[in-house]
């Protein structure tokens, strides 16, 4: 028995070695953390979505500039203010051979709306989804929703029959004691087919030669196989790239980019990420929690906020702390988001003398003491940025006590509203400014820990939710940005930069959402 | 002997109970698991509902009680992040850790003991001095640095050995092994050296000092007087008598090798339990953390027990003593 097992083992090892040698082009890549699950509706988390988007398609896809392009839907338009109609692509089949039609779309949306789905908040405006005929569906929303097409780019389509056959009509619940079939098995319509899934160790995808999108959305890739291995330690990840054990590293540490670039046959690609880093100031309370100022809240004075803004030397942070890998920001959202303009992104000038004068005018000629809460494992060089800021604010007399903690503690204290002065970064999955206002600026925004509240901005936020006229809506967004920017409730720092390290022979367009699409890859 | 083992087992249960208690009281400070589980769009009410569902709003002592009750029937819950049974996940990861620990332990013994004997016998030899100086490096350099250095030299510069992962593994009915493929062995070299280097130097220095001590004793002089060969004196008499402390230390170190494999596993992306634990810490996956700590405590307890029993085998005096004690009632 033992000998048989040995023989089998060696046989298997040989077989894999031989089959790999054909004219197959294998793209091996690594990043810090593996997908948590392959169930496309169970976890709304970066690495999970990246992996699932290779296997499952959505009705609408995004190209390398993040523009919406037809996916499983060939066209879409509102037929009534609250009804969007989608014409579906014909002749598409799932990896398991089942034909794709309207039933699958209705099923998938209902699944994504179910209690255990992690995507229900993306589409919580959807009240009904109905099949008109085999290749037409209508999505009914509880009010006009101009950005529904943006929201549904994250909703991936599963096969109804397959899901029913394997008992995975609902995403898995935390209460479930066993993993469901969909966690490690897939059946999508996407450009790659799951070949092997070993969570945390290795995931192998092979190209779907019959994908509908070849020469429709993208030229056919010459990659035949994509092998993913998570490597948690950043130094090891870079070593694996330098020693050519992988062709592509999604998240090389910033300090190693020069090393990668200077290595022959390796290159680095950079782009601004859809994520902006900023400080929030709690101006809602009458007295700060951790400050030597009692009886009043210095942040309530606009002069104090402006002074703090002007005291931050963002150029130095960019040059020294970020090693050039950041774009200084004037508002808290990034290029690529609807509503962003270069004019808005202009910063107030760095001017410590004026900052000191402003503080004196506000009644704090000798400054005051305050605590800054910072994560130390969430954003690029987060703690170092805060340390730099502490020094800069000290120059105008504000004595900052830095409290840097892991993200699991930082975000908990934010949500418990325990912070006076904190660092936060914000990405925008819908690529629309409304997302920023509704979470960060509206009085009721669930991530607005500043206590900032403006009646006009609240009104605009509500109105842009239902305004379908693009020009009118853009005017509202512009007005809202002016209000928020003038308030200085948030002190913007910079837009984060993402950098991918890869071999020279790999052509893979970098995208600001940090999610590679291997359908666009070409290898030499 | 049976009474001894039983007593030890009962002690072990207490140890594990305390490990569970201490780790549980620490979990309150590692942060909010719910934040890691849901997207930013999730409302505060939904977060509260999830906390309620996971029992995170109960007092710590109630959570602890529930946990112990389940652990007693070997139920360790479901991972928050992966939504899979923790016992199953640990079982999947255990072979990688145990194989790595085993190879490093064997490596450190096979090299460490001869080096210790050599340096003990030739105190002033050139090689002895060299070994001792090199061993300082092994003791003083942190594991992750050794790992990175080895990767830099052997993977990046020379391109001889893989920098990460287990290479080719063969699944033998649930136990994945890297012992059966060349690739697997190649992948084992760097991590096991990294993990074993500290133990190697420890064993070498221990054997050396024990040898120096033993060589001064009367029975060695007597053995020489009897005209025994050097070989018989050194290995038959001296080395054998140094083994009791070496076994103790090696045994206890095997426990630490398994436990401290965390760092080596992370550096080499070795898919073992330690790496899973570290990931669980960053995502506040309490079920994994708790089960892992319990398991490591269990390993320590079992290894201790085995070490105690090995004394009986190696040291005849212990057997005689107990014999006497029972004899006199």
Image (cartoon, rainbow, N blue to C red):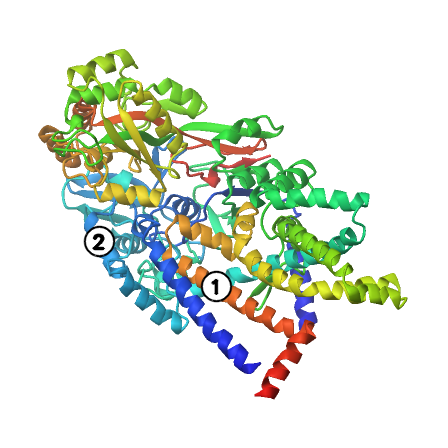
Q: Residues within 10 Å of mark 1 (few under 14, many from 20)?
A: many
Q: Nearer the viewer, residue B26 or A247?
A: B26
Is any part of residue A501 visible from this angle?
yes
Quick one: which residue is furthest to the right in this view? B227
Q: Residues within 10 Å of mark 2 (few under 14, many from 20)?
A: some
Q: Nearer the viewer, residue B29 or A494?
A: B29
Residue at image position (68%, 46%) is: B135
Residue bearing the label numbered 1: B297
- Gap in Å between the C-alphas at discs 1 and 2? 33 Å
Residue at image position (59%, 32%) is: A505
Residue A341, located in which quarter of the rendered image?
top left
Judge left or right: residue A164 versus residue A451. Answer: right
Same chain, labels 1 and 2: yes
Residue B269 in percent (x, y) is at 54, 48
Residue A307 in percent (x, y) is at 23, 19
Is any part of residue A25 visible from this angle?
no
Position above or below: A403 against B247: above
Residue bearing the label numbered 2: B48
Residue at image position (52%, 29%) is: A257
């Amino acid at each position: 028995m033992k000998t048989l097992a040995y023989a089998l083992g060696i046989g298997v090892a040989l077989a894999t070695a031989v089959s790999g040698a054909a004219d197959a082009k294998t793209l091996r890549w690594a990043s810090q953390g593996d997908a948590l699950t392959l169930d496309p509706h169970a976890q709304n988390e970066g690495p999970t979505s990246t992996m699932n988007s290779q296997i499952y398609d959505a009705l609408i896809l995004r190209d390398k500039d993040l523009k919406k392009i037809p996916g499983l839907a060939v066209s879409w338009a509102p037929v009534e203010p609250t009804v969007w109609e989608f014409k579906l692509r014909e002749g598409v089949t799932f990896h398991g051979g089942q034909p794709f039609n309207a039933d699958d779309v209705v099923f998938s949306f209902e699944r994504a709306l179910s209690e255990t789905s992690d995507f229900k908040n993306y589409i919580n405006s959807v009240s009904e989804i109905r099949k008109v005929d085999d290749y037409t569906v209508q999505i009914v929303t509880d009010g006009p929703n101009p950005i529904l097409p943006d929201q549904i780019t994250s909703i991936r389509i599963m096969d109804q029959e397959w899901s029913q056959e394997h008992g995975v009509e609902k995403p898995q619940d935390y209460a479930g004691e066993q993993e469901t079939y969909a966690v490690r098995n897939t059946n999508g319509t996407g450009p790659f087919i799951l070949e092997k899934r070993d969570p945390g160790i290795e995931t192998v995808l092979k190209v779907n030669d019959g994908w509908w999108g070849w020469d429709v959305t993208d030229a056919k890739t010459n990659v035949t196989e994509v092998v993913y291995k998570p490597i948690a330690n950043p130094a090891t990840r870079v070593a694996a790239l330098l020693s050519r054990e992988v062709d592509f590293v999604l998240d090389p540490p910033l300090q190693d980019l020069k090393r990668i670039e200077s290595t022959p046959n390796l290159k680095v690609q950079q782009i601004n990420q859809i994520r902006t880093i900023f400080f929030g100031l709690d101006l809602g309370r009458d007295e700060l929690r951790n400050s030597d100022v009692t009886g009043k809240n210095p942040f309530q004075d606009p002069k104090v906020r402006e002074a703090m803004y002007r005291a931050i030397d963002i150029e130095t942070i960019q040059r020294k702390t970020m090693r050039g890998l950041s774009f200084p920001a004037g508002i808290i959202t990034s290029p690529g988001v609807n509503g962003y303009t270069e004019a808005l992104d202009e910063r107030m000038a760095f001017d410590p003398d004026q900052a000191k004068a402003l503080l004196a005018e506000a009644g704090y000629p000798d400054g005051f003491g305050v605590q800054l809460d910072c994560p130390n494992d969430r954003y690029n060089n987060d703690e170092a940025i805060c340390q730099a800021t502490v020094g800069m604010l000290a120059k105008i007399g504000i004595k900052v006590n830095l409290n840097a903690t892991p993200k699991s503690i930082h975000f908990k204290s934010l949500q418990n509203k325990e912070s006076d002065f904190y660092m936060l970064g914000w990405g925008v999955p819908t690529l629309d400014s409304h997302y920023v206002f509704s979470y960060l600026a509206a009085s009721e925004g669930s991530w607005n820990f500043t206590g900032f509240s403006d009646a006009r901005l609240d009104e605009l936020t509500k109105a842009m939710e239902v305004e379908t006229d693009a020009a009118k809506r853009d005017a509202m967004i512009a007005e809202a940005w002016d209000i928020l920017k003038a308030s200085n409730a948030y002190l913007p720092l910079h837009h984060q930069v993402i950098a991918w390290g890869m071999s020279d022979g790999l052509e893979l367009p970098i995208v600001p959402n940090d999610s590679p699409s291997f359908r666009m890859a070409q290898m030499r | 002997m049976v009474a001894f083992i039983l007593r030890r087992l009962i002690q072990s249960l207490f140890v594990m109970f305390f490990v569970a208690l201490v780790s549980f009281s620490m979990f309150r400070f590692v942060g909010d698991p719910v934040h890691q589980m849901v997207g930013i769009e999730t409302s505060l009410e939904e977060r509260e509902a999830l906390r309620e569902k996971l029992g995170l709003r109960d007092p710590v002592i109630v959570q602890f009680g529930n946990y112990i009750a389940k652990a007693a029937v070997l139920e360790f819950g479901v991972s928050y992040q992966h939504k899979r049974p923790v016992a199953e996940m640990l079982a999947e990861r255990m072979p990688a850790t145990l194989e790595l620990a085993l190879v490093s332990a064997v490596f450190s013994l096979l090299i460490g003991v001869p080096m210790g004997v050599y340096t003990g016998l030739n105190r002033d030899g050139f090689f002895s001095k060299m070994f001792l100086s090199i061993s300082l490096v092994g003791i003083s350099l942190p594991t992750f640095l050794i790992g990175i250095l080895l990767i830099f030299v052997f993977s990046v510069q020379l391109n001889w050995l893989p920098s990460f992962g287990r290479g080719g593994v063969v699944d033998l009915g649930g136990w994945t092994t890297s012992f059966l493929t060349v690739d697997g062995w190649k992948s084992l070299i760097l991590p096991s050296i990294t993990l074993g280097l500290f133990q190697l130097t420890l064993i070498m220095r221990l054997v050396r000092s024990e040898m120096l001590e033993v060589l001064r004793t009367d029975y060695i002089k007597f053995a020489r007087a009897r005209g025994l060969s050097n070989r018989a004196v050194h290995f038959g008499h001296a080395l054998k008598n140094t083994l009791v402390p070496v076994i103790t230390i090696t045994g206890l170190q095997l426990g630490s090798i398994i436990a401290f494999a965390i760092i080596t596993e992370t550096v080499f992306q070795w898919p073992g339990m330690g790496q899973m634990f570290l990931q669980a810490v960053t995502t506040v996956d309490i079920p994994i953390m708790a089960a892992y700590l319990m398991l490591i405590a269990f390993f320590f307890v079992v290894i201790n027990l085995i070490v105690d029993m090995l004394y009986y085998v190696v040291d005849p005096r212990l057997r005689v003593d107990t014999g006497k004690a029972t004899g006199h009632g």
